[in-house]
Amino acid sequence: MSQARAPRADAVRNRKKILTAAGEQITAHGPDVGMDEIAAAAGVAVGTLYRHFPTKTDLVAAVVAEYVARVADDAEAALERVTGGTRAADELTAFLGRVVEASAADRAVKAAAQALGAEPVDRATEDRAGTAVAALIHAGQADGDIHPDVTVNDIYLLFSTAPTDQPPAARNRWLTLVTPGLTTTRPPTSS
């Protein structure tokens, strides 16, 4: 029985460069940016890009999957801070704000994913994020700081309705307005 070989270091570097360039190019130029432009921005040959990602849909799905992995990592880091003593309600609110800001920055990538029907295939990463968010909610509920009826689906609903196409001041105002729906404490007033 043969074991699968680990990817070569240059292949890993190229994949990372391609994913970074794809996110940047789609954000800067919209979902219609060409694979040639993405390859040039990544500093790789078009053939290298297609070896990693046979179609643009595959490429966009991988970019979205990376975004989901960053969200999962962020949620787990927030939960780790709660375990270390920070308040779960504060961490959940801050997490919500970070995801909304990241979503605003990646808006074009998400539009491309929808247009191309690109779905990230790594459900385990989505589950990881959901598990961490659920634990944050439960910790906040145990502290009495998060309303007892708040669920992970509520957090996902908030993400889907966030004003990611609005300027930062509007996104901050949105967070100020939704926080009382999650928490039992009043948020600090913004100046």
Image: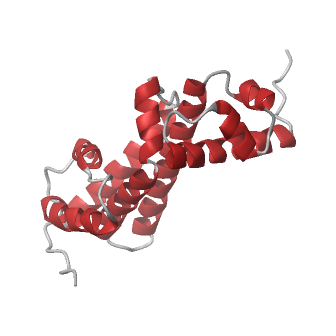
Please give the name of the residue rendered at 66% of the width and 39% of the height, measured from the top-left corner.
38
User: Of residues 2 and 37, which is closer to you in this image?
Assistant: 37
Relative horizontal placement of residue 6, taking residue 35 as reference (left or right): right
Judging from the image, the colouring scheme is secondary structure
Residue 96 visible to an observer of this rendering: yes
Whole-percent x, y for residue 90 in the image: 30, 70
Quadrant of the image containing the N terminus: top right
Whole-percent x, y for residue 47 in the image: 79, 27
Relative horizontal placement of residue 140, taking residue 60 as reference (left or right): left
- In the figure, 69 relative to 171: above or below? above
Q: Quadrant of residue 45?
A: top right
- In the figure, 125 relative to 96: above or below? above
Whole-percent x, y for residue 37 in the image: 67, 38
Whole-percent x, y for residue 178 in the image: 17, 60
- In the figure, 124 relative to 191: above or below? above
Residue 142 visible to an observer of this rendering: no
